[in-house]
């Protein structure tokens, strides 16, 4: 049984024809299910948990990368399969998963190739793609050693599914996260980035000297501050993927 | 997500993927890994890996180093044990003992320490040996 979750921004009139096309395609492919529309008045956690209790086994998020990030964090601990329908061509998650935009994504859902993907976990928050700390003095402890940039300004990017400038291919099924530390120095009005440090890991702790903690931007949503424990949650999420996905 | 080689993994730092310590980063403590390691920054402590080690010309190391193969181009203060081959680039400066199966030293490299070479694996050595030289075979 499917649950289709429409993000709140899809209530705008300009998406009406797209949603109608998606709904028609879902009927044609015989993968129809319950539809839920997110709004500020609805508790997304409760909505999904109630649906799972009622027998939903597949949750499909319709929206953009922020929609997918929001839903993934809720369903990660649940025994459900996750699918996406991106409403535009900008979704990086869709590109990695090999899911085409708009109603074409319904064909991928119907084909139902399911892969178990790793998730990153910061304290108790799950993320699929990446987390980032910008312009902060940080230190990373991994088991019995510590990494400390010697520059004041650093960007630390924790990658599970990579599409940053250092990686062209990605594999969210290998049980490894990577910390990419890019130090930078201020030169007049510009910031010059220095050669990065790349650390593969399964568990680290990030500390910062910033008063009150440095903010961690996770899948484009600010959610946490340092100090933070970051670890891999291997094969945590069952996801419907396309044949054009960027991993095996 | 590993952006590098797909190898085995175990433990916190023992991942098979390549670890790259950049020039503006200091690593302190005990690192034990399985993949290749590149150090261009500062290392203090101990490092051992089942993969290869490369120390860049700007690197500054005060540590015991163990690896399969190693290429040293920077400054190392500490002992180096390599199970296969060790290559010292012209900019290498080693203050410590070296154990290796084979050694290549470029003109300009500096070594201050005891050199031990053996046909046996360095980890199985019982004592110090003189460098071995193959005798010409008589027909």
Image (cartoon, coloured by chain):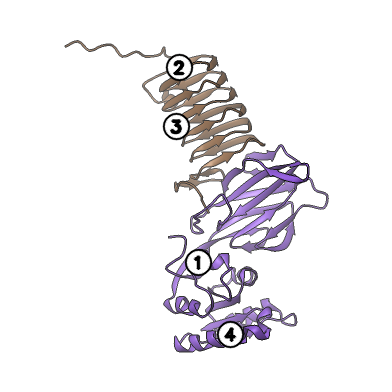
Q: For label 2, count other residues whose C-alpha is less than 10 Å away and answer few (under 14), some (14-19) or many (20+).
A: many
Q: Which residue in the structure is indicated by mark 3?
A: B68
Colour chosen for chain B: brown
Observer-nearest of B28 and B21: B21
Q: CA distance from mark 1 to mark 4?
A: 21 Å
Q: Which residue in the structure is indicated by mark 1?
A: A97
Please tell me whether mark 4 sits on a helix, a strand or a loop: helix
Q: What residue lies at 52% left-to-right and 79% top-to-bottom? A: A57
Which quadrant of the rendered structure holds the C terminus of chain A? bottom left
Query: Disc 2: which chain?
Result: B
Residue A129 at x, y = what percent? 59, 60
Colour chosen for chain A: purple
Please tell me whether mark 3 sits on a helix, a strand or a loop: loop
Q: CA distance from mark 3 to mark 1?
A: 37 Å
Residue B48 at x, y = what percent? 52, 33
Query: Disc 1: which chain?
Result: A
Residue B116: numbered disc = 2
Marks 1, 2: nearer the viewer: 1
Residue A47 at x, y = what percent? 65, 81
Q: Which residue in the structure is indicated by mark 4?
A: A19
Residue A2 at x, y = what percent? 53, 82
Q: CA distance from mark 3 to mark 4?
A: 58 Å
Compared with residue A120, is residue A19 higher up or lower down, i.e. above or below?
below
* Residue A12 falls in image quadrant: bottom right
Please tell me whether mark 1 sits on a helix, a strand or a loop: helix
Q: What residue lies at 59% left-to-right and 77% top-to-bottom? A: A62
Q: CA distance from mark 1 to mark 2?
A: 52 Å
Marks 1, 4: nearer the viewer: 4
């Amino acid at each position: 049984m499917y649950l289709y979750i429409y993000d709140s921004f899809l209530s705008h009139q300009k998406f009406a024809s797209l949603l109608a096309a998606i709904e028609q395609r879902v009927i044609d492919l015989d993968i129809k299910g319950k539809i839920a529309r997110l709004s500020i008045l609805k508790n997304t956690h409760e909505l999904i948990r109630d649906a799972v209790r009622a027998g939903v086994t597949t949750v499909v998020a319709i929206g953009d990368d922020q929609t997918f990030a929001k839903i993934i964090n809720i369903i990660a601990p649940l025994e459900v399969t996750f699918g996406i329908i991106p409403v535009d061509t900008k979704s990086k998650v869709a590109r990695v998963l090999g899911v085409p935009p708009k109603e074409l994504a319904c064909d991928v859902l119907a084909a139902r190739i399911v892969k178990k993907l790793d998730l990153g976990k910061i304290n108790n928050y799950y993320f699929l793609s990446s987390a980032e700390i910008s312009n902060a003095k940080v230190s990373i402890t991994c088991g019995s050693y510590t990494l400390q940039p010697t520059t004041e300004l650093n960007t630390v990017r924790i990658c599970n599914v990579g599409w940053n400038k250092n990686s062209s291919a990605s594999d969210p099924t290998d049980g490894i996260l990577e910390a990419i530390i890019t130090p930078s120095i201020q030169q007049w009005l510009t910031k010059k980035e220095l050669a990065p440090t790349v650390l593969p890991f399964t568990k680290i702790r990030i500390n910062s000297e910033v008063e009150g903690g440095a903010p961690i931007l996770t899948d484009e949503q600010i959610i946490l501050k340092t100090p933070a424990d970051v670890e891999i949650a291997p094969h945590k999420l069952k996801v419907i993927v396309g044949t054009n996905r960027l991993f095996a | 997500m590993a952006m590098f080689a797909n190898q085995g993994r175990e433990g916190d730092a023992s991942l098979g993927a390549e670890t790259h310590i950049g020039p503006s980063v200091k690593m302190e403590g005990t690192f034990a890994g399985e993949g290749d390691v590149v150090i261009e920054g500062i290392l203090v402590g101990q490092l051992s890996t089942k993969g290869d080690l490369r120390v860049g010309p700007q690197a500054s190391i005060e540590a015991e180093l163990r690896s399969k193969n190693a290429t040293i181009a920077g400054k190392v203060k500490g002992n180096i044990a390599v199970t296969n081959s060790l290559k010292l680039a012209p900019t290498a400066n080693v203050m410590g003992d070296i154990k290796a199966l084979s050694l290549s030293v470029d003109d300009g490299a500096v070594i201050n320490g005891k050199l031990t070479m053996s046909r046996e694996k360095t980890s199985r050595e019982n004592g110090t040996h003189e460098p071995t030289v193959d005798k010409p075979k008589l027909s």
